[in-house]
């Protein structure tokens, strides 16, 4: 777990010299989740004029940006289904260009069971870890891979991608942008809207595989396509849908300026950049946070113990450490939490940046 962003003050993982009965830890909380959002009716998405289920196109007939808003990449994250369905009902034909909406994993969504809500995340494998060309062009088959290949033409024509997600564990909303200036501009333009999530997170990818926002179309060094992901809040809360709808409205309002100049016209707040420095993996079955941290919590002092993992203690490596969606029940080998450091300055978009 190396740090490449700023000076590190303290090691993240420290092995205790001997067994102690005084290690802090709250134990793993109950896995019973509150479901306060009903399952949406997505029957209108089953048959599409383009003959691909879950894909709807709204074409202005005029030249302009190709906008893609996608949700339900994980079948149990159906707050995005609500946001997409409400948008569909508005017949959102843009003034210029074309808007494409995708409900990505309807088969996994159909398997949702409120008594086992986590299991509907995917059927065979995580649809948001398949977007490297070696997977897409390989010989492997799965229901998610087949679906990714089916959606690929819509991905590869997009100028702007907004990927809607939610979190299993409590977290403040935030954006994730891949490490490209043009995509950071997109995320920061959205985050600068009044009363919208203001944190834009950048990392070097996910340890489990390539996410959609990291598809080669958005990562090409000489390309122009922009992508970002919104983590809008907990899976099954009405407020998460509200955040998604506000971000969608801002994107559709500002899309021409973002597409051409990498910035919004109307800004209500500053956006803040943060860079992931550490992925903390659970090395034992006894990983336990000392407090039920909420995603977005900031730990003021370097060296603060935040968790235990067997005989190890997990500490913050620097002051003002940002906790990214702590997994309060990690299994051995799973990601427990990501640690991020805010940059020293607010992001200032540049109209000519296309790196």
Image: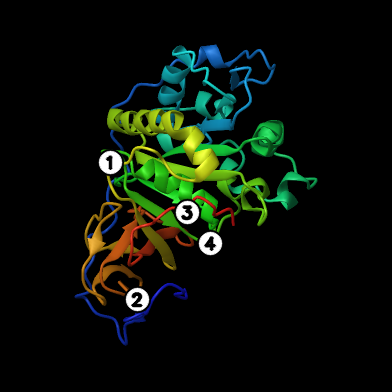
Q: Which residue is mark 1?
A: 268
Label 4–label 3 contact, CB within 8 A? no
- Number of numbered discs present? 4
What is the spatial separation of the Cα atoms under label 1 and label 4, in whole angstroms? 29 Å
> Which of these two is toward me, 89 or 45?
89
Give the residue drawn at x 33%, y 63%.
Answer: 345
Residue 130's place in the image compared with 2, above or below, is above
First of labels 3, 2 by sequence position: 2
Q: Which residue is mark 3?
A: 350
Give the residue drawn at x 67%, y 21%.
Answer: 52
What is the spatial separation of the Cα atoms under label 4 and label 3, in whole angstroms? 22 Å
Q: Which residue is mark 4?
A: 204
Residue 8's place in the image compared with 240, above or below, is below
Residue 242's place in the image compared with 144, above or below, is above
Q: Is residue 126 visible?
A: no
What is the spatial separation of the Cα atoms under label 1 and label 2, in whole angstroms? 44 Å
Q: Which residue is mark 2?
A: 312
> Which of these two is toward me, 8 or 353?
353
The secondary element bearing badge 1 is classed as loop
What is the spatial separation of the Cα atoms under label 4 and label 2, in whole angstroms? 26 Å
> Which of these two is toward me, 61 or 114?
61
Label 1–label 4 contact, CB within 8 A? no
Q: Nearer the viewer, mark 1 or mark 4?
A: 1
First of labels 1, 4 by sequence position: 4
């Amino acid at each position: 777990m190396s740090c490449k962003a700023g000076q590190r003050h303290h090691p993240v993982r420290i092995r205790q010299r001997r067994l102690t009965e005084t290690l802090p830890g709250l134990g793993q909380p109950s896995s019973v989740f509150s479901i306060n959002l009903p399952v949406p009716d997505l029957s209108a998405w089953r048959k599409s004029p383009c003959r691909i289920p879950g894909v709807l196109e709204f074409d202005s007939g005029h030249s302009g940006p190709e906008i893609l808003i996608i949700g339900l990449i994980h079948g149990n994250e159906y707050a995005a289904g609500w946001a997409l369905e409400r948008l569909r009902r508005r017949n959102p034909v843009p003034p210029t260009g074309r808007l494409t909406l995708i409900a990505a994993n309807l088969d996994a969504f159909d398997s949702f069971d409120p008594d086992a809500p986590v299991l509907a995340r995917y059927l065979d494998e995580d649809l948001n870890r398949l977007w490297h060309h070696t997977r897409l062009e390989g010989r492997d088959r799965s229901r998610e891979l087949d679906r990714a290949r089916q959606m690929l033409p819509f991905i590869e024509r997009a100028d702007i991608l907004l990927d809607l997600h939610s979190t299993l564990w409590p977290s403040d909303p935030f954006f994730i942008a891949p490490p490209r200036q043009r995509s950071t501009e997109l995320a920061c333009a959205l985050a600068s809207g009044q009363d919208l999530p203001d944190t834009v997170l950048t990392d070097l990818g996910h340890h489990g595989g390539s996410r959609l926002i990291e598809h080669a179309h958005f990562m090409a060094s000489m390309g122009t396509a922009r992508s970002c992901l919104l983590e809008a809040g907990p899976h099954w809360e009405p407020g998460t849908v509200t955040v998604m709808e506000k971000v969608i409205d801002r994107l559709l309002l500002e899309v021409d300026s973002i597409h051409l100049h990498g910035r919004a016209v109307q800004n209500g707040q500053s956006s803040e950049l943060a860079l992931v420095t550490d992925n903390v993996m659970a090395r034992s079955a006894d990983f336990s946070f000392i407090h039920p941290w909420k995603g977005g919590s900031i730990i003021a002092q370097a060296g603060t113990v935040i968790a235990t993992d067997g005989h190890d203690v997990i500490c913050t490596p620097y002051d003002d450490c940002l906790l990214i969606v702590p997994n309060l029940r990690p299994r051995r080998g799973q990601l427990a939490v990501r640690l991020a450091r805010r940059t020293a300055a607010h992001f200032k978009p540049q109209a000519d940046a296309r790196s």
